[in-house]
Amino acid sequence: MGEEGKAVNSNDKFLSENTRNKADYFEASQEFSERLRFSLCRKTKPSFETQTWMRYAAMILLPLVTLSIALPMHTRSIQRSEFTNAVIDAHIRSTLAKHLMDVESTDQHTVKPWFLGKIDFSPPVGNYAEQGFPLGGGRLEYILGRPAAALVYERAKHMINLFVLKKTNLVSEASHIRNDGFEIFEWQEGDFSFVAISDLNQKEFGEFIHLVQSR
């Protein structure tokens, strides 16, 4: 670099440092700072009218949201209660009308095929005669319009109806109900919903449920 170039660079450096050292800095007054802060707050904070409208909107929307959540749950609870009552009615009707079985057999290999063509699923059928719960047979049932395979078991002259349906949310994952002198247990397993009902005592009824679930 020539002498002329060095001189230019030296002058630029001098001017830059001199300007930085001599320049005046503007210091905002307190009044100006407060006005600026107030102006920024007005831009970011909703107006009184907006806040009022938002409060009214929340008052209207919150109950609607709560209702939209609670109503389906309440409706399902009612439907499940109706389903349980329908199960009790089906159990009582089967004993009073002497229509306990459409197919009478202690052989599960006879009862299971009987349902073919009558319902659109093949219910699991077990025989627990060795444990004191012999299979008596089965019949076709409709519970709230839903087809069900009713499997009939016996224990010391107490009848047990085991209803097998295609999986439905009207049946709980696992629930024990005592209603009108009947023991009712319902559960979900695979593609099926199960509901067992009997006037058998709770202890023996529990033994039967354990056998069915452990098959």
Image (tube, helix red, strand yellow):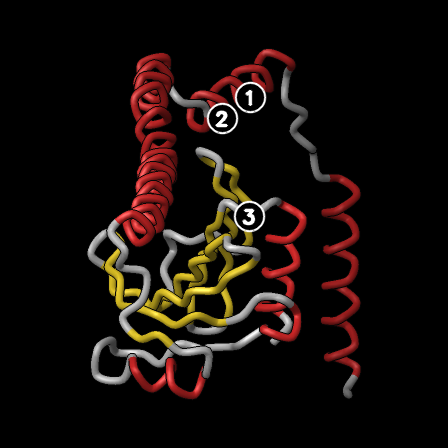
How many residues crowd around disc 3 within 10 Å: few (fewer than 14), some, or many (20 or more)?
Answer: some
Q: Are marks 2 and 1 in contact (CB under 8 Å)?
A: yes
How many residues crowd around disc 1 within 10 Å: few (fewer than 14), some, or many (20 or more)?
Answer: few
Image location of residue 31, percent across then percent down = 59, 11
Residue shown at 34%/41% (left/top)? 85
Instruction: Examine the rendered structure and indicate whether residue 49 appears above or below residue 142.
Output: above
How many residues crowd around disc 2 within 10 Å: few (fewer than 14), some, or many (20 or more)?
Answer: few
Q: Amino acid at mark 1?
A: Arg
Q: Mark 3 highlights which residue? A: 200
Residue shown at 64%/14% (left/top)? 30
Residue 102 as seen in the image, left or right of residue 131: left
Instruction: Examine the rendered structure and indicate whether residue 21 appears above or below residue 114.
Output: above
Disc marking residue 37 = 1
Image location of residue 192, percent across then percent down = 42, 69
Q: Which secondary structure, mark 2?
A: helix
Q: Amino acid at mark 3?
A: Leu
Residue shown at 77%/88% (left/top)? 1
Q: Which secondary structure, mark 3?
A: loop
Q: Nearer the viewer, mark 3 or mark 1?
A: 3
Q: Mark 2 highlights which residue? A: 40
Q: Nearer the viewer, residue 108 or 56?
A: 108
